[in-house]
Amino acid sequence: MVLTEGAGGMVLSDEPAASAAEEEMEDDALSSGAALEAFGESAETRALLGSLPAVHGERAAREVAEERFRVIMDKYQEQPHLLDPHLEWMMNSLLDLVQDEASPPALVHLAFKFLYIITKVRGYKVFLRLFPHEVADVQPVLDMFTGQNPKDHETWETRYMLLLWLSVTCLIPFDFSRLDGNLPTQPGETRIPIMDRILQIAKSYLVVSDKARDAAAVLVSKFIVRPDVKQRKMASFLDWSLCTLAHSSFQTIEGVIAMDGMLQALAQIFKHGKREDCLPYANTVLQCLDGCRLPESNQTLLRKLGVKLVQRLGLTFLKPKVAAWRYQRGCRSLAANLQLSALGKSEQKLLSDSLTSDGDEDYDVPEGVESVIEQLLVGLKDKDTVVRWSAAKGIGRMAGRLPRELADEVVGSVLACFSFQETDKAWHGGCLALAELGRRGLLLPSRLSEVVTVILKALTYDEKRGACSVGANVRDAACYVCWAFARAYEPQELTPFVTAISSALVIAAIFDRNVNCRRAASAAFQENVGRQGTFPHGIDILTTADYFAVGNISNCFLVISVFIAGFQEYTKPMIDHLVSMKINHWDGAIRELSAKALHNLTPQDPEYIATHVFPTLLLMTLSPDLHTRHGAILSCAEVTYALYKLASQTNRPVTDSLGEKAVQSLKQIHQQLYDRHLYRGLGGELMRQAVCILIKNLSLSRMPFKGDTVIDGWQWLINDTLRSLHFVSSHSRQQIKEAAVSALAALCSEYYMKEPGEAGSAVETELIPQYLAELQSPEEMTRCGFSSALGALPNFLLRGHLQQVLTGLRTVTCTSPKDVSFAEARRDSLKAISRICQTVGVKAEGPADEVMCKENISEVYSALLGCMSDYTTDSRGDVGAWVREAAMTSLMDLTLLLAQREPVLIEAHICERVMCCIAQQASEKIDRFRAHAARIFLTLLHFDSPPIPHVPHRRELESLFPRSDAASVNWNAPSQAFPLITQLLGLPTYRYHVLLGLAVSVGGLTESTVRHSTQSLFEYMKGIQKDAQLLESFSETLLKVFEDNLLNDRVSISLLKMLDQLLANGCFDIFTSEENHPFCVKLLALCKEEIRKSKDIQKLRSSIAVLCGMVQFNGDVRKKVLLQLFLLLGHPFPVIRKTTASQVYEMVLTYSDLVDADVLDEVMSVLSDTAWGGELPVVRGQRNHLCDLLGVPRPQLVPKPAPGS
């Protein structure tokens, strides 16, 4: 047995306990909600409280102690009762510090702060009774107030706790005047009675801006209702508070604070005071409250306190009594319940009759009650939930003291909230009030039929507002009403409504858009199953649709719904709800899910769907409302296909299920939309997508439309949609394109085949040439659409046109200056080429116009491999990555196809290029594409049915990447990917391409990628330091990469950064012993060429670092490197001169043999003291001086040619 937590409590389930992995995925709050069993930090808390005298003087230590105590206490926020056994010793140890006269003020404040933290977690009501409250405590507590500054915002906790303490000491059972005799007086000093002092303190703190105001209200409620104080001070205090209230305005912040304090105090007095004491003042307070016009205030708290006070006044007007007429289900006492169950029916009836014989009719209702109830009903419609909730509780309390007829009128007024003229706020408040009345037994069973009707409406309440809707709170509150009713009524009272309520809750639990509403409905259903026991198939349903299962909306619509619809009581209500409420929903995702849900539910009741639902859907396709039309067309498509699948099981056509009229209506949908111009404008996007899905599903359902004019209309729509994709909003472009392409594929397969495997001549001659022409469109999206369309064509249409189609698509994959940014078109054409290859198949000696064969396979490989070097960038970033990703996938699909069918077509040089290009992508900087490339690389390597021929270094690769480890590596993580990929540097065939990819990663910007790629490269370099031949080979490859990518900034700048790292880490130390090593000479020549006439700051800075690293090489090359650096010291850009000077300074310090000892100080002085950002002639003079000191020839200015020479 495991516990499953729902919003309505805990329920035992027979399911096995979840695994550790599943438990970790659960919400923290849920999984750890009941984890604590006791206060486990008792010893640490004792030590912490004991350390306060030592730490209070040092700010850092004090804050650490306070924060630690907060962390400990906050842990028990949800289970504060665990603190109860420890509260007394914690309070005593803190109050000892407070009461110790030797304690400095800072320590006292800290002790009170700790007391407040405990109070915040446990609540002040529990805490109050633990304060010392002897007669001797009154004077010391009052004396502590003299040292308080109400405006000191650092110490408000002290004042808050003192007021709470004072409110307890007020409860001593002696007249305060008896304490006044003990007051010592100085000559000339007037003695203030203790009663006046307390009242003065309370009044002064009722108008402060901090939390002490709340404690002052508690103090007033305890103090004013004392018998001795009540006689002397109550009238004057109420007069003062009402005057303050009347003279305060909620338009100013001071007024809001004062009103808040007064309202809290009055509400507390009327709550705790005796009715006979408060009744004389109630009317006056009510009139003053009416004058304040609180409902007009925009302060939520004031309106809430106003409602709270109004209900307290109402309860004061009415005698406190339990309504004898109320409905009771059992008793609170278990023993009483057992006694009742032992009595026979007749005795129970007699007992209940005696309870209800109280005479209501001779009870006069005071006149103020009507005003109170009216204000509470207005409060139910307030814009804030807390106000509505307070009003709902007030109505419940008031109705419990009213005679039956008047209470029934209140119920009628609450039911008036459920009008469609009312806002969602009124519906929400009405639901809360009904739940409260039901909970208290004040909704008699005679009213249930009306109440259940409105609650069922509230369970589906959803009102569109602009681009979204309101009503989730109403539906949630309606679930709460159902939950409350389950606990309030006997099963026989709710039996007539079981079918409606159970269906409505199931529908809300699986079809509500809001996850909180789904969970609330699930909890309410669970409560009804447990308490009522009358819900059909309750246990089966709640174990499937539990709190966690309803969290995923797709799972609810597409999986759970099918299970529940298997119980016939729920099938039709669920289908009807989808048709009436969900397929016209404002959220497109819900409409699409609803259509799919109808598809899944069709097998449960195909006859009902075909005879009742389908005609309704067809009528809705003509609706003027866009959302209704969209949802209805999608639903028609899905239901038709579902009926076809059912009919095909018995070899019948779908027309048998639908009937001729429905078939004709389906055929006319496109023409009706076209005639009404509904494919245009903003709604046109939704219509095109929906009708494309309809075309696809009707084609798959083999509708008898072959040769009909409707096929031409459908073909026009598909073509026009693909042609006008650039007019579609970017977020729905892909979805509409996919819908149109899948519609085309289904349409062609079903309606364009003349004989098996042969196309109709008219289609063949028109369709492909038309599509190929569109591939030259100046609009990128049009190219995307028609590329994908060509890729989706069936084999019989491609036969005889294969070369033509492949040539057209290959043209789209080529990058030309005018369409360089058309990355998406290139991506889609690559996908189309791959799909066509799969469609037509492979035959080595087959005709080139019908299958993939040795004549055309090399051209396809050439196009795919060409796209592997697409690095186009625009404002969106590296858009070429989409092309490379599609090219990699297509290469894999094609190679696997050839390996399975015609391995002889895979040539060695092609296979080598494929593997090398994918290895390069697997070492580049973008995580997602690197991971994609690595997975493809391993798929090709490990494919064994049969193995792919000619994979270079297969044996070494299989030892580097064992099949067993392939699944465990996370290629997205640089820390796991790069150590494996860099091992390919040891294989000569892959070295060039991997190094090219690594250059981009090592010189990249992402910190984790740079770090792990650099570490992996250094690990490899460390391993080859002693192998001169391997290092020579590596350096040659590195220079080859540089040479091939000269002036290609994407690679060259990153490569310079990588070279800087390699040189700085001594990776080429073995070359420094040889004078003028070819590596250094070649590298210098390439660097000079790269930065010649460059104005790229980043490139120049990277080259400076490389040149400084090259100084470690011996021979003439060193002088040439220094000359390049001195040229950069005289560069026109000040930032480059400064960077060069700084780097050269560090270089001179690093390589001590570079400068003779006798000029070292002067060289360092010139480098550090010269203002390299200054005037160019001055700077160049200093630069020339450095040249002389180091024996480097001075750079000569090249004279500019004279104009016209």
Image: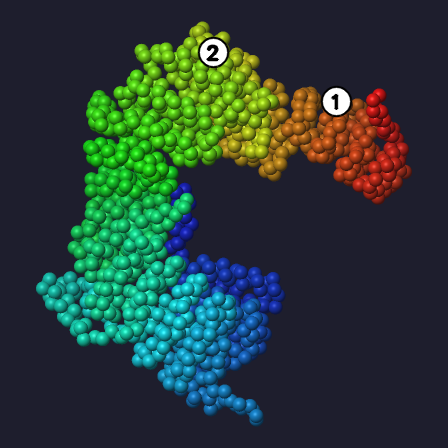
Query: How many other residues sit within 10 Å of disc 1, few (<14), some (14-19) or many (≥20)?
Result: some
Vertical side of 597 occupied by 1202: above or below: above
Name, please, the residue furthest toward the left: 346
The residue at 20%/55% (across/down) is 449
Q: Tell me which corner region of the image, top left, top right, bottom left or bottom right, holds residue 227.
A: bottom left
Q: Is residue 934 left or right of residue 632?
A: right
Lower position in the chain sequence, tag 1 or tag 2: 2
Q: Tell me which corner region of the image, top left, top right, bottom left or bottom right, holds residue 393.
A: bottom left
Instruction: Verify CB contact (< 8 Å) between mark 1 and mark 2.
Output: no
Vertical side of 32 occupied by 61: above or below: below
Tell me the quadrant of the picture where the C terminus can be found.
Answer: top right
What whole-number distance in Å separates the C-alpha atoms at marks 1 and 2? 46 Å
Q: Secondary structure at mark 2?
A: helix
Q: Which of these two is toward me, 169 or 586?
A: 586
Q: The disc labelled 2 sits on which kind of residue?
A: Gln
Which residue does the numbered mark 1 point to in the structure image?
1082
- Numbered circle sitting on residue 579: none
Which residue does the numbered mark 2 point to in the structure image?
803
Q: Which of these two is toward me, 659 or 812?
A: 659
